[in-house]
Image: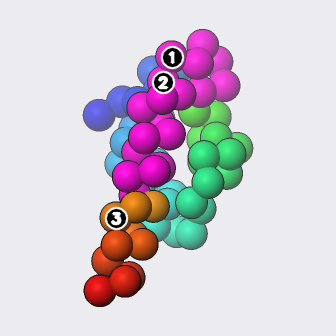
Amino acid sequence: MYVCICKQVTDSEIRDICREGCVGFDEIQKKTGVSSQCGKCCELAKSIVEEFTHTTSFSSAA
């Protein structure tokens, strides 16, 4: 699903970048340009990064 239409960034792309080691929204934004145009996607993009970070820390604790 497209998260950022302005920069054509998908949720899968954000998750893939998180899997590669980027866990901060600022890093994701630098790599993809998400939320740098109109900003309407900012909250959704941040929630995907946060969800990924939470899921990763939960599974590594097990």
**Looking at the image, residue 21 lies above or below residue 33:** below
Q: Earlier in the sequence, mark 3 or mark 2?
A: 2
Asked whether residue 8 appears in the rendered view, the answer is: no
Identify the image quadrant of the C terminus: bottom left
Residue 16 is left or right of residue 42, and the answer is left
Residue 32 position, x and y percent, is: 60, 41
Q: Residues within 10 Å of mark 2 (few under 14, many from 20)?
A: some
On the picture, is 59 further left or further right than 53? left
Would you name the residue on which mark 1 appears?
40
Q: Nearer the viewer, residue 51 or 19?
A: 51
Q: Which residue is mark 2?
A: 41
CB-based contact (under 8 Å), mark 3 and mark 2: no
Residue located 34% across and 73% down the image: 58
Is the residue marked by circle 1 packed among few (<14), some (14-19), or many (20+) residues within 10 Å? Answer: some
Q: Identify the residue position indicated by label 3 in the image.
A: 55
- Residue furthest bottom in the image: 62
Q: At 48% across and 24% down in the image, what residue appears? A: 41
C-alpha distance separating marks 3 and 2: 21 Å
Amino acid type for the residue under numbered disc 1: Lys
Looking at the rendering, the stretch of residues picked out in magenta corresponds to: 35-52
Q: Residue at x 39, y 70 (%)?
A: 56
**Main secondary structure along the magenta-highlighted residues:** helix
The mark total stands at 3
Kind of residue at disc 2: Cys
Disc 3 marks a residue whose amino acid type is Thr
Among the two numbered marks 3 and 1 on one chain, the one whose residue lies closer to the N terminus: 1
Which of the 4 image quadrants contains residue 60?
bottom left
Q: Left or right: 37 with respect to 59?
A: right
Q: Which residue is rendered at x = 64% and y = 34% of the image? A: 33
